Image: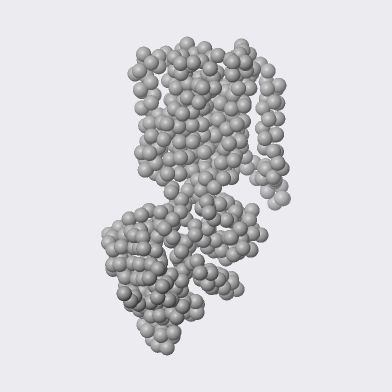
Amino acid sequence: MTRLMRIPFAVEALLIALLVIAFFAFPYNLAFVTRILIMVLFVLSIDLVLGFAGIATLGQAALYGTGAYAAGLFAVHVTAAPLPGLLIGMVAGAALAFLSGLVLLRTKGLTLIMLTIAVAQICQEVANKARDVTGGADGLRGIRMEPVLGLFEFDFIGITAYWYVAIVVFIVFLALKRLAAAPLGLSLRGIHESPERMLAIGAPVYRRQVLAYTLGGGIAGIAGALAAQVTQLVSLEVYSFTLSAEALIMLILGGTGRLWGAIVGVVLFMTVHHVAASADPYNWLFFIGFMVLGVVFFLPGGMIRLPQALLRLGRQR
Amino acid sequence: MRLPPTNGSETSTWGRAIMTEPVLNLKGVVAGYGDTTVLHGLDLTVAQGERLAIIGRNGVGKTTLLATVMGLTRLHSGTICTNGQDVSGLAAHRRVSAGLGLVPQTRDIFPSLSVEENLIAGLREDARLEEAYELFPRLADRRTNGGGQLSGGEQQMLAIARTLLGRPSLLMLDEPLEGLAPVICDMLMETFERIAADGKHTVLLVEQHTELALEFAERVVILDAGEIVEDANTEELRRDPTRIERHVGVGMGAT
């Protein structure tokens, strides 16, 4: 992978190729592939927060859900143009991340994890009680999106939705790739490894963590907004603990701290889910469980490290 | 008004003595971990451009002193000033902006980042990576290597280079030669000489090797049980080694 990175635009070309192949390979499953892409975006936001900055979170759904509700309400009450809605979702996710982050990031470890879960639970309860605004347990209905840029109508098969989501994911992925190589991204990885050391070499650790959490919140907000616009429904499930936890498992499967890990993990998890759940609707989680065990024991760096691990194994023979 | 020169050295003129604040000024510094006090009221002034070594046995508070100056250990009482600015209440990263730089004993390289990434992680806007590579050409060869793959000497070079990119006026080195091969020690000592001679840095060396410390420093401070028991220029101490042996416990004086 590192050798690949050195060829100019190799990453961009590979991404575009994957997106085009997925489009032609699954013409009748575009909605599913679109869901995978939205999930990739969501898992990327966790990768930034947890994989890079080392902020342990099990409540990323709070930011995803807030982005979803913000974009949904905006579409119902203000304008149904998709791009402004996306912006609103991003701002809402980032704002909640910033405000909660100011408090959360004063804590560490288990306390931090519990607080992130608490934030998501509070959001869910607020959305549940505010029936008049959010539709409560029935979900927010009546979202009818206008064409993207006034040109591309959302069609029944989901072609527009697919490309709309694909382009957003592509842009965010490239932005994150640039961030990863920039001083900010590297200082976040430094903070992950040793906050004390980063302080001692002059990095304002707390402020950087709040910044990373806010950026992650913005990306999660975009993912939530995309989900709301594409499915034209926002339910209380957007705040569910399961969503945060599954996304974290996807990230661990793929490999934390690496952007490709988010893609690999999500595709693997959702494909296994799709296939295994249709074969055995009750026990499909067993497969996921075994995969996670396998990865944790044999590939601590995630599936993204599989080729390297196999190469090393081959050389030892 | 007549002011005394900052130290006995011939290079300091009256003008400089008035213009320059001490790079480090400690008054009544009491510090420690939790309820345990390690430093019992230290007073220490380090003039700009001075080459100072702090020596002493294990556990007398050398590392604690550096951590306290850097803001990594809680200051119980007393004040810490650098270049005339009181930094006693500042967080560590603000003390870096104020001109303090510490290379910790543990080096604290980020093993999962490459050499270059380790340097960039702490980069400030006005610093240039090339400065680090000019000082340590070895690091330039190892640019893309992981921090975890470096030898002990290379890790130390990286730790020093990374701290220098924070543009410290006071560079504090905590036992930088510990566990390194003699060849590497010589090379690093040479580098310290160059850093101290470039007119931009004051170097404070904490060292267990008394001989190497005396070779480098023009002034030596000896710590014992959290107090300064000797503060003299190197020549003076060389003439009367018992003053060192009494507190450091090397050579014939050891009991």
Q: How is the image coloured?
A: one colour
Q: Position of residue A43 (x, y in %)?
A: 53, 32
Would residue A254 be visible to someone looking at this image? no
Q: Pick the residue in front: A285 or A151.
A: A151
Asked where in the image residue A26 lies, by quadrant, the reply is top right
Question: Measured from the top left, where is residue B247 in percent x and y?
Answer: 36, 79
> Considering depth in this image, is A286 or B147 the residue closer to the camera?
B147
Q: Position of residue A163 (x, y in %)?
A: 63, 22
Q: Is residue B182 above or below residue A156?
A: below
Q: How many marks?
A: 0
Q: Residue furthest bottom?
A: B239
Quadrant of the image containing the C terminus of chain B: bottom left
Q: Residue at x 60, y 31 (%)?
A: A171
Q: Residue furthest front?
A: B1
- Quadrant where the N terminus of chain B sits is bottom left
Between B169 and A315, the one lying in front of the other is: B169
Residue sitting at x 35%, y 71%: B44
Residue at figure coordinates x 57%, y 43% from the top left: A180
Instruction: Give above or below for B47 relative to B145.
Output: below
